[in-house]
Amino acid sequence: MGGSVKEVRSKQELDAVVKGGAPSVLHFWASWCDASKHMDQVFSHLSTDFPLANFLRVEAEEQPEISETYAVSAVPYFVFLKDGKVVDTLEGANPSSLANKVAKVAGSINPGAPAAPASLGMAAGPAVLETVQEFARGNGSFQVQQHGEPVKIDALKVRLQQLIDSHPVMLFMKGSPEAPKCGFSQKVTDILKKEGVKFGTFDILSDTEVREGLKKFSNWPTFPQLYCKGELLGGCDIVTAMHDSGELTEVFRGHGISIAASDEATNEETGSGKAGITESTGLSSALTSRLESLTNSSQVMLFMKGKPDEPKCGFSRKVVEILRQEKVEFESFDILSDDEVRQGLKVYSNWSSYPQLYIKGELIGGSDIVLDMQKSGQLEKVLLEKGIVRKENLEDRLRKLVSLSPVMLFMKGTPDAPRCGFSSKVVNALNEEGVAFGSFDILTDEEVRLGLKAFSKWPTFPQLYYKGELIGGCDIVMDLKNGGELKATLSE
């Protein structure tokens, strides 16, 4: 310990520290994530204010076993341990929350001693407060407390408006124009270059406050977002449609935006805008051809560490889970099995980490992007727009079948030609009661016949359903009829 951050090199090393029982804080980070770097400054200062706690830095992608143990699927991510057990976690770039959680887990490690000054919610130490204020000035409005009095750094709405107005054409994107971190941001930057307009950008991945605040400020839940003279034009779909129709050029001209000579736009068009590919990538034509073939080998293609049933890192596991939740059929490629593909794809896609998800050959992004898109509903929208049909499993199919008609009979044969006496008796009972019903011949579909037994937890046929709920088999139907309750039961 002693007031410094220690780099974790192995799970065995980490386990040895954690078993000691002292308060420990793990910072899972990634070298490509600017938010991780910002938070690490606060993390380092906190380590000096709490010298009796362990402050451990873990490079999430380089230590997949540790990341998987603590269910890490996004960075920055913090885990707080005490007496060898996880007592709290924190996801995202929130210095104030980090300091408060550190103080909570490590503030009472030496009963009777004065409280350490790191918690921003208690009495912030000068080094930490200075770092957070600097962070806030560059990244949004945090409410920092010093000696119990709130210090208002900035008004987020004012800062957002200032950012929007900072350039006549302003793009809020993931990454930068030189290194976009999602396919949609890449596409919009390509369009703006083709339009020949100068534009400013802001990397929303580097600033959680701006990223979340702008969604509410603009009433637009996804990124990128393009503004012209302070007015929101829209996201990738709208910008693409406006570009294709020529409307985007009209908007720029109407707002007095100067457009560069057409040869500049032409030059942009002659290079490949797909996933950052240019003639200067330095990749051989053979490798480029192979990578292009791989990214297009399936409508939904995931380049990951390991396989879907055996992921080798938490980030890959998370994307696999999301795709399965979305019920999407996808293929995968284990980048750990082929170093040429692993290194080459980083250059080809202009994306430095894994996993990488492609839809119809277009880079979508990594685990953070995919998770964000799923939460906002954008992933489902993109899949539909790309014509990706959700995979219907047997349970989904059975739920639809039992609800095809308000009264639904699964029987052997058809109402006009029953293939067993029990099915015949139920058909006659329904007809005598004047109940309209739909039917399904389970002898024509083995999957439905066997699946419905497990689905309904009823081992025999026929099976009668009302509004998707199982009523029962032949004996129960006949008991209801004989008791005068069948028609009433099927019309409630």
Image (spheres, rainbow, N blue to C red):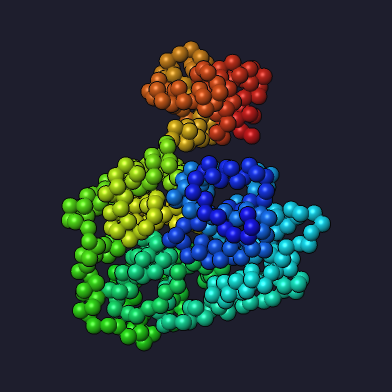
Comparing 52 with 381, the one in front is 52
- Measured as percent of width and height from the top left, residue 480 is found at 63, 21
Q: In the rendered view, does 48 fall on the left or right side of 147?
A: left
Identify the residue at image location x=69%, y=76%. 151
Comparing 431 with 121, the one in front is 121
| In the depicted structure, whether residue 31 falls above or below residue 86 | below
Residue 3: quadrant of the picture: bottom right
Residue 94: quadrant of the picture: bottom right
- Measured as percent of width and height from the top left, residue 428 is found at 52, 19
Q: Quadrant of the C terminus?
A: top right
* Residue 238 in view in this figure: no
Q: In the rendered view, does 122 fall on the left or right side of 56?
A: right
Q: Quadrant of the N terminus?
A: bottom right
Comparing 244 with 333, the one in front is 333
| In the depicted structure, whether residue 202 falls above or below residue 408 | below
Identify the residue at image location x=40%, y=20%. 443
Residue 153: quadrant of the picture: bottom right
* Residue 158 in view in this figure: yes
- Measured as percent of width and height from the top left, residue 54 is found at 62, 53
Residue found at the very far right of the displayed protein: 112
| In the depicted structure, whether residue 49 falls above or below residue 8 | below
- Measured as percent of width and height from the top left, residue 469 is found at 58, 31
Identify the residue at image location x=55%, y=63%. 40
Residue found at the very far bottom of the displayed protein: 256
Q: How many marks?
A: 0
Q: In the rendered view, does 245 fall on the left or right side of 312?
A: left
Residue found at the very far front of the displayed protein: 2
Identify the residue at image location x=33%, y=61%. 350
Residue found at the very far top of the displayed protein: 421
